[in-house]
Image (spheres, grey):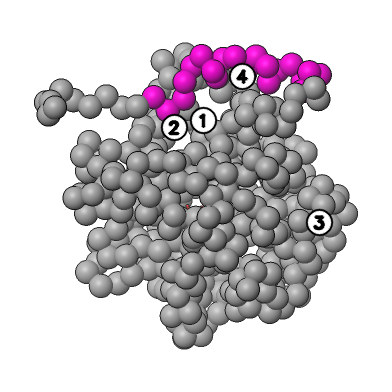
Amino acid sequence: MATNAPRQPKRIIRTGPLLAGFALAQMRPLHRFLPDRVRYQLPLSWTPHMLRTFLGSRRSRVFIDVHTRLRGPASYAPRVATDEAWAMSEGEIRGFWDRGYAGPYTLLPPDEMRALAPRMWELWDKPSSTYPRGSFRYVGTSHSGEGAGEMSNEEYATRGLNARDKHLEDPTLVDLYGHPAIVERVAQLLGPDLLLWRTQFFPKYPGMGGTGWHQATSYLNETMRVATLSPPHLDELFQLTVWIAVTDSTIENGCLRVIPGTHRELLPMRVEEYDPVRHAENKSDRFGTKIMRPADGIRDEDAVNLVMKAGEFVIFSERVMHGALPNITKDDARLGMSGRYIVPDVRIHNPWVLGDGGLTIAYLRIHQLRLDRWRALLVRGEDRARVNGDRVLRYRPGMVVNP
Ligand SMILES: O=C(O)CCC(=O)C(=O)O
């Protein structure tokens, strides 16, 4: 029956199960008696501060990543010595720590990247062999977005997943992420040993909304209970993202943007279910099946627009508040791609997710994603920690892990 009553936003997190789970999550000595399927459903990554913030705000302020403050470095000296071509000065490194990003730098001359762009567009669209159909379940509605000129939730989710980790499938792409112009600079900020654990294409077609402001560090948002990355010290810099412009990236076609200095502390968000009618004007804050925006608002005048030529890249900490402008052009599609680099003593996923449980991606409503074909690549140095076992492969130029 049709009704004019305003639709109530659905509850994102149910308080009763959260409280019970949190209590059990605190009882660490008991966990070894729990089967993985129970243990890794607990909100193990939630801190008391996150719970208090959530409950004290009547459930309106939610941390989509673990609340943490970043500890500054002992020194601004580069953490490795490298070829002069890629060397960063102490001033540049200090600038990174002050602002949360560095660059743009050149990976390839614009003409060379433009020549590669058609292949990159094809790769983004090509069905994944790392996460093939049948390796996950989409559990959301299939109709959100219909009639609103937007992708349905299901298309958003499956396309978003399909955009992931194509570097495991293509020899040209893996060599872009393994290029010394990137790896040697990341090493000067993070250290000599580096894993590439995730990559993703970010296309913006003409008319597409922006990417809403968000922060990340350990990808709690994937399950909203247990973070994907477990570093020995969450308050240290253990990960960096490199965003590569495949096409020119302009103010008009939706360039990446950041709020400098916001990487020092993770902040709460407001999260709602995406509804194509209620959120018709909010396209930029859509993350899959959710609408998310910083709880305390952002002053647009503090933003820096990272305009880049094809072939340029920036290095940023995903802790910095970042997003992208909408594409307001009629015919200028932009393509960016991100690679996430970590130090090898960060544990990626957990035994349940890597085994029978599979990965849940809460904001995409994807369940039980099989990770059998996922691998992290050692792109520099050694994996001495071995916390990720045989999921780590040494990068070789032109390698294809999943043909
Ligand atoms: O390119 C975009 O629109 C967003 C990129 C982003 O959020 C990221 O690389 O973490």
Crowding near pointer 3: few (<14 within 10 Å), some, many (20+)?
Answer: few
Residue placed under numbered mark 1 in the picture: 63
CA gap between label 2 and label 4 equals: 21 Å
Crowding near pointer 1: few (<14 within 10 Å), some, many (20+)?
Answer: many
Q: Residue at x 69, y 69 (%)?
A: 401
Which circle, 3 or 2, is nearer the viewer? 3
Percent coordinates x, y for residue 328 in the rendering: 25, 61
In the foreground, 125 or 347: 125
CA gap between label 1 and label 3 equals: 32 Å
Residue placed under numbered mark 2 in the picture: 269
Dividing the picture into quadrants, the one containing residue 50 is top right
SS under mark 1? loop
Q: Amino acid at mark 3?
A: Asp
Dividing the picture into quadrants, the one containing residue 252 is bottom left
CA gap between label 1 and label 2 equals: 6 Å
Mark earlier in primary sequence (2, 4): 4
Mark earlier in primary sequence (1, 2): 1
Marks 3 & 2, CB-CB < 8 Å contact: no
Mark earlier in primary sequence (3, 2): 2
Q: Which residues are magenta?
A: 11-31
- Residue 343 highlighted magenta (yes or no): no
Which circle, 1 or 3, is nearer the viewer? 3
Marks 1 & 4, CB-CB < 8 Å contact: no
Marks 3 & 4, CB-CB < 8 Å contact: no
Q: Is residue 294 above or below residue 321?
A: above
Residue placed under numbered mark 4 in the picture: 21
